[in-house]
Amino acid sequence: MEAIMTEKLAPLDEKLTQLNGKLTHLILETPCSSPVFTPCTCTDDMTDANGMRDGQNNPGDVPWPGTTFRIVEKATGRAMTLIDGELAIRDATGPDDPNTHWFCVEKNGCFGLMNPDTGRYLGNDGGTHVRAWSHEMGEWEYLTMRKHPSGGYQILSPAEENKLKVMCVAQNRTVLCRRDHGTTLWVFNKVEEAGR
């Protein structure tokens, strides 16, 4: 009986040996099996001379409640800035500029962005203007961030009962506006808030 089993298993054993040889050959030829390791030379923490991460190449962070961000226009790297109560798009000054910090909050399922230094929320006037006047988060301060396939986020705000408008950099390239359609994309960069 043992001789019969050995005779029947011999072809299977031979095929298994051939298969193992082929697998070994494949494994040795794959690029992943190379013993050479080349570390990545770029990091998410690369910054420019002002300590800013580049808006064009930086994937940014995910906007989420409880986190403070610097929000930059992806195309230019210019920051959403609150100057004397008015919103503007300005060249980045440095990571510690409180005028460029926006604390993300959530209310009624919508996000909001509040400047921690002034306590004012990013919102709109019910029309096309974007502003930061209110010290309370109401419906005009509700925001939705939508990830874009090209990187960055669109910032949307309610316009009517069933409509959202896109927050864009206005034609003059210095202020923000709301439109039905727009191409402005935003990058959210986490900011470490000291003592807040």
Image: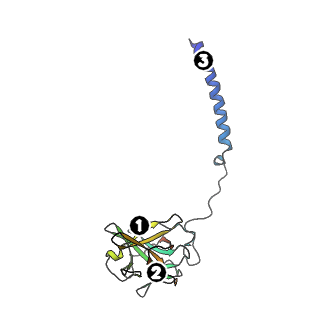
Residue drawn at (64%, 33%), measured in percent from left and top? 20
The amino acid type found where label 1 is placed reads Trp
Q: Identify residue for label 2.
A: 176
Residue drawn at (49%, 74%), measured in percent from left and top? 182
Left or right: 159 as drawn, with respect to 81? left
- Please tell me whether residue 106 is drawn above or below residue 80 in the rendered image: above
Query: Looking at the image, do the residues carrying marks 1 and 2 touch, with CB atoms under 8 Å apart?
Result: no
- Which label's residue is closer to the chain start, 3 or 2? 3
Location of residue 29 in the rendering, given as x and y in whole percent from the top left corner: 68, 43
Real-space CA distance between mark 3 and mark 2, rounded to the nearest whole angstrom: 80 Å
- Which label's residue is closer to the chain start, 1 or 3? 3
Location of residue 125 in the rendering, given as x and y in whole percent from the top left corner: 37, 82
The amino acid type found where label 3 is placed reads Lys
- Which label's residue is closer to the chain start, 1 or 2? 1
Q: Identify residue for label 3.
A: 8
Relative to the observer, which residue lies in front, 108 or 4? 108
Mark 3, other Cα within 10 Å: few <14 / some 14–19 / many ≥20: few
Q: Identify residue for label 1.
A: 64
Residue drawn at (41%, 67%), measured in percent from left and top? 64
Task: Please give the label number shown on residue 172.
Answer: none
Image quarter hosting the C terminus:
bottom left
Location of residue 34 in the rendering, given as x and y in whole percent from the top left corner: 66, 48
Relative to the observer, which residue lies in front, 139 or 195? 139
Depth check, mark 1 against mark 2: the one in front is: 2
Real-space CA distance between mark 1 and mark 3, rounded to the nearest whole angstrom: 65 Å
Task: Find numbered disc 1 in the image and state the secondary structure of the residue it sits on.
Answer: loop
The amino acid type found where label 2 is placed reads Leu
